[in-house]
Image: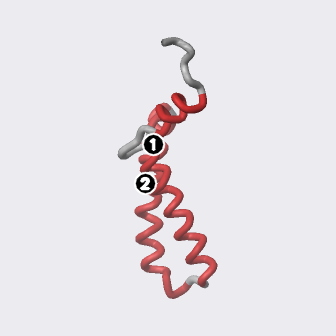
């Protein structure tokens, strides 16, 4: 469970890659709305990986912006 807690965004990237492959092969069998929902899901997973994995930095930025230290 610690692995998943520490690397959930990497697991999400793997799910996004699998979803891209599935979308390519099932493109003709899906309606336009299903395609859009699937692509939105993939973009969300890739965005989360970009924020937390590579290049990362989102948690540090959020801590500095939302909970700044009072120490000088």
**For residue 69, which quarter of the picture?**
top right
At which x and y percent is residue 2? 48, 31
At which x and y percent is residue 43? 50, 62
Quick one: label 1, few (<14), some, or many (20+) residues within 10 Å? some
**For residue 57, which quarter of the picture?**
top left
Distance, label 1 to label 2, CA atoms, is 11 Å
Q: Nearer the viewer, mark 1 or mark 2?
A: 1
At which x and y percent is residue 56? 40, 42
Tell me what residue is drawn at x 46 percent, y 46 percent.
Answer: 51
Q: Is residue 24 above or below residue 28?
A: above
Query: Element at badge 1?
Result: helix
Q: Which mark is residue 18?
A: none
Disc 2 target residue: 13
Left or right position of 30 against 21? right
- Residue with the most extreme bottom position: 28
At which x and y percent is residue 16? 46, 60
Q: Earlier in the sequence, mark 1 or mark 2?
A: 2
Disc 1 target residue: 52
Please tell me how many numbered marks the rendered image carries: 2
Q: Nearer the viewer, residue 25 or 41?
A: 41
Query: Element at badge 2?
Result: helix
Quick one: label 2, few (<14), some, or many (20+) residues within 10 Å? many
């Amino acid at each position: 469970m610690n692995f998943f807690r520490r690397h959930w965004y990497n697991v999400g990237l793997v799910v996004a890659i699998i979803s891209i492959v599935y979308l390519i092969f099932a493109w003709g069998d899906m309606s336009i709305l299903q395609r859009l929902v699937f692509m939105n899901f993939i973009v969300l997973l890739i965005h989360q990986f970009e924020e937390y994995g590579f290049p990362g930095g989102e948690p540090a930025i959020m801590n500095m912006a939302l909970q700044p230290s009072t120490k000088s």
